Amino acid sequence: MTLDRRRFLEITAASLGGALLSSCNANPEKAKPLLALAERGNEVVERGLFRHTAMNDVASSAHVAGDAFPKYFVSDDVPTLDAAAARAWRLEVSGAVKRPLSLSLDDLMKLPRITQKVDHFCVEGWNARATWSGVRVSDLARVAGATDDAHFVDFAGFDKGYHESWDMESAMHPQTLVAYGMDGSLLTPGHGAPARVHSPIKLGYKNTKYLTRVVFMPMRNGGYWSDEGYEWFGGT
Amino acid sequence: MSTLVKRNHWVVRLTHWVNVVAIVVMAGSGMRIFNAHPSFARPGETFALNPWEGHAIPAWLTFGRWLGGARHWHFAMMWLLVANGLLYLGFLFLHGEWRDVVPRRGDARDAIEMIRFYLFARADHPRQGKHNALQKSAYFAMPLLGIVIVLSGLAIWKPVTLGFITALFVNYKWARFVHFVAMAVLLLLALVHVFMVFTVDPYSLRAIVTGWYDRARSPEARNARPLYHLFGPARPAPASTEVPPT
């Protein structure tokens, strides 16, 4: 069989295309370094685009999801504190701070309160509205005196070791709250009682529920779903 | 006189095949991402425009295996798709070849004549330049859909940081719907394109690989409709209005 230039090019193009496609599906391991490189590149772009002035804007007339707001946790059952445990609950603010804090729910509620109707963006693709009340993480950082070493924040809770670490800029966004209220009531166990992280600027899985610890860190600390292979940045 | 013409510049051929890979991966991974929540309604709401609300896309059509994997593919391949699209559009603009695809007066009439020809309401193939009027409208619509897809994609990737883009589509929910529908229309056009290549003008495969096209075998020369006169004998090339690229 003679193979002229045209035929050669046609066969080459067809087999390259085919090999590329089949290798992707047959062996995603080979693509992992490239995908990891793209994720790092995307993070640079996302952090470069990030602005504290870019806010999630939900009309005050917009409906909230209410009872339809999905409840989510990784434990087998809803993580719930009994009355005594709820009284003993503390939010520890520690790490790269001048004044570590140990706040009861009452202490938390004495700090400046923000109430905002915002979107919740789930990695699955849905979004749901709710009105959240709580304290800005930036206010916690100010009260605790976060130091220059605080480049990341780890949010951990009592839901089977769930935690997610954030970049400092996202944690300091004015819409990033430690929320204790939802739609005018205290949080229920299904939504992360007694307090949770809530922000429209990160995907839902970054918003740790059942919060117990806010740790300012010089290094990032992964996270429950980030370690499973979802993007660590997870920003909106 | 040879009837061979150099029809497609190497930039067009390269970007065409890169596009094939990029769009297959983007559409497949996008549908896998969609399957994580195959609805457009927010929780507690309904969405009337999607008759298949809640129904997932068959897994064999998807790519990336799981939500996180598909997202990594989607957010990596998007850069190749955008770079490739910019290269193609930049080339069309700088090289003057946008004239082959941008609609002009008379295209609507020519498109109707092409449809009449395909429906046997007209015996002879309408005269054409590089592309017939139906092709032109499809090749013009594809980059437009691409722009809508990229913008609506940015709108749902960064609905807060790039909230002003999301606002172009009203809000996140509608941007997601536009992103999906534009993808579906683009895939439909691509499927029709592939069908027409094999049933009307398989000789154009050569032109999109090596660049060379035999005008003596053009659909116009063969008077070819889908599946008709596919292997018609080479005829003297009609006086074409096609201008070969330089």
Image: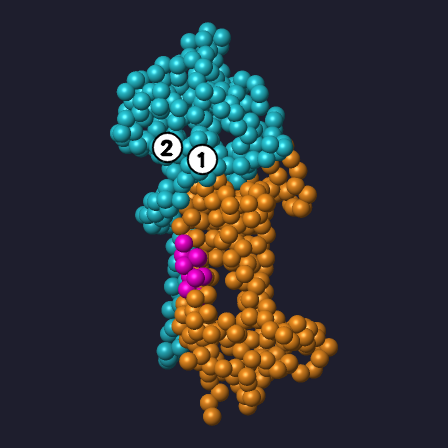
User: Residue A4's x, y, as percent?
Assistant: 37, 79
- Residue A70 visible in the snapshot: no
Quadrant location of residue B220?
bottom right
**What colour do you see for chain B?**
orange
Q: Are marks 1 and 2 in contact (CB under 8 Å)?
A: yes
> Is residue B143 shown above or below A71?
below
Decide whether residue B81 is among the magenta residues: yes
Image mark count: 2
Picture disc at residue A112 = none
**Magenta-tinted stretch:** B79-88
Q: Amino acid at mark 1?
A: Lys
**What colour do you see for chain A?**
cyan
Tag 1: Cα neighbours inside 10 Å, few (<14), some, or many (≥20)? many
- Depth order, front residue of A174/B3: A174
Q: Main secondary structure of the magenta part?
A: helix
- Depth order, front residue of B195/A48: A48
Q: Residue at x 42, y 21 (%)?
A: A211
Q: Residue at x 44, y 79 (%)?
A: B245
